[in-house]
Image (cartoon, grey):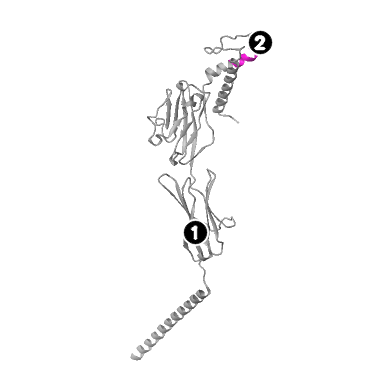
Amino acid sequence: MRRSPRVYASVSARVCVGLRACVTHVKSLPIFQVTTMHHMEVLKMDFRIFKSSLLPLVLLWFICDTVAGFVVTAPPDPVVAVFGGDVVLDCQLVPAKPPQEMEIRWIYMPLTYSAPVHLYKDGQEDLTLQPLGYRGRTELFLDNVAQGNLSLKLKSVQVSDRGQYKCFVASAAKHDEIIVTLNVSGTGRSPWIEMDSYTSNGVRLGCRSDHWFPEPPILWVNGKGEKVAAQPEIRYQSDLQGLISVHSIIEIPKDSGNEYTCVINNNLLKETKEARIQIADAFFPRASGWMVAFWILFFLMLGAVCFALVLFRKLHNNIQGKNFRLQH
């Protein structure tokens, strides 16, 4: 499998970091000191003893310090933020560079390079170009920038914040960037169930909840924990913040049980909200014996009246016809 140049560059940079740490440790030994002004000027020891093992290490360290540059890295998986909360978009510089030598530019991908969400240059933050929607909601970890931590903290996350962010780093000799994807999710309020209406067969139940994102799946189960066979009607509606209200209606036949649960899931946050209702038998329309007899008798009488009217009209027409013929 062919590896991308970024993979090799990242590995090389991390090797250089390891070499730097190793050489730093060696430099601290009393028998081996390298001046800080020059990478290797004076070796205060018998060079013949150590040259075979330490010289390649020191040379690699020197090469890394002058040639390797840096690589911008971030975790590959999308970041999931909770609506209204704070989130950190991770971005690391390997190896770390002095902040005064870098420009750090966080860019929301629908926006342009000239409208950064957060900008750091010349050793300080510059928020003059920051879009209004991000004012007061972004910050860098300034105490850790020198250690290569270029992560962005985004506060009071909104639905409109979701998307791709670019962590762009530039020095006088090199620049690099990486994309961080942000997903926003919100678990709404606990649902409530209400009697929507009566039907000829039973009742219609409604389940409502709001402040969800994205559109949540909704499920009805009976008292046995089984999914209700009837297909529910589901309606979604967005508010001004982009959050979702959900309303589900289902018809419950009178002989299908009395206990039902409305379950709403947030698959991104792995959270569930539910509401349960116990329907008394009195709420189901039931036809009593005398009511059945009444309606049967009513329709029989109605049929008899209709039949009598038709027969009367027919006899009346026959009599009129005979009278007409007798007159002529």
Q: Does 298 sit left or right of 19 as displayed?
A: left
Q: Quadrant of the N terminus?
A: top right
Query: Farthest bottom residue?
Result: 326
Tell me where the magenta segment starts and ends, as one range: 48-58
Residue where numbered disc 1 is placed: 205
Q: Position of residue 202 (x, y in %)?
A: 51, 64
Residue 270 relative to residue 236: left or right: right
- Helix, strand or loop: magenta stretch: helix
Q: Position of residue 118 (x, y in %)?
A: 43, 30
Query: Tag 1: Cα neighbours inside 10 Å, few (<14), some, or many (≥20)?
Result: many
Could you say whether the residue bearing mark 1 is in a helix, strand or loop?
Answer: strand
Callout 1 amino acid: Leu
In the displayed structure, would residue 217 be above or below residue 119?
Answer: below
Q: Amino acid at mark 2?
A: Ile
Give 319 or 148, whichever is nearer the viewer. 148
Q: Which mark is residue 49?
A: 2
